[in-house]
Amino acid sequence: MGWITKQSASAKIERRGEAYLTPAMREKLTGEIRPRFEKPLAAVLPALHMIQHEYGWIPHQAMLEVADALGVKPSEVLDTATFYEEYWLNRKGECLVSVCRSIACEFCGATDVTEAIKTRLGIDVGGTTEDGKFTLVELECLGSCGSAPAMLVDEDLHENVTPERAVGLVDQVVQGAYKHGGSGAEHHKA
């Protein structure tokens, strides 16, 4: 088995004029978060959460700033951020559409749901529309196996989703007619 390598040492990091880790965030990180842990590396997770909560994603410049503030290697921050799926290393759309890809959802047509959304939005899984409105992802399990296939629109659960219903939900968001709350209690096929 061969290793696939990437040229991260020569990668260019986009930088903006101001720091992502604001003075207040740096103070919280070094004054409140860091002292709770025996080793500085343990504070990386809450630091990344703080950055993502503030900006909606974790820019590479912010990872360098976190490494500097904690006195750890930038590679350790990057390794942590890329290991956990909950961290966004690219900007995501205003609306996150997530389709379950668990075995139950797969058997009940989740692939068709994903394909319909990809076609409607003109993006692939993991992509964001050019206008920044939507990001499409697949998740491993939403815990709704009895009402598969399931999907999320932001944090709203929709069950028994058909490709047509999924596109309809996306269209509702586009038209500003989407009502938050999901269909967790609904068990019908649209």
Image (spheres, grey):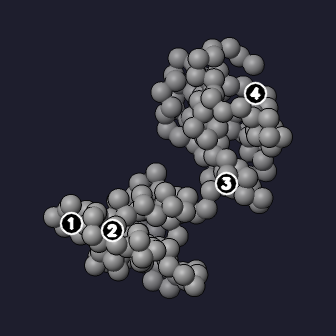
| Left or right, residue 189 beside residue 92 | right
Q: Which residue is mark 4?
A: 165
Residue type for callout 3: Gly
Q: CA distance from mark 4 to mark 2?
A: 44 Å
**Nearer to us: label 1 or label 3:** 1
Q: Are marks 1 and 4 in contact (CB under 8 Å)?
A: no
Q: Position of residue 30 (x, y in %)?
A: 29, 72
Above or below, 21 relative to 128:
below
How far apart marks 1 and 3 lie (CA) works out to 35 Å
First in sequence: mark 3 vs mark 2: 2
Name the disc covering residue 29, or none: 2
Point out which mark residue 93 bears. Answer: 3
Camera-nearest label, 4 or 3:
3
Q: Is residue 180 visible?
A: yes
Which residue position holds label 1? 35
- Picture residue at 50% right of the left edge, 85% below the top: 10
Q: Amino acid at mark 4?
A: Arg
* Mark before the other along the chain sequence, 4 or 3: 3
| Residue 13, horizontal then vertical, whole percent | 54, 80
> Label 2 amino acid?
Leu
The quadrant in which residue 166 appears is top right
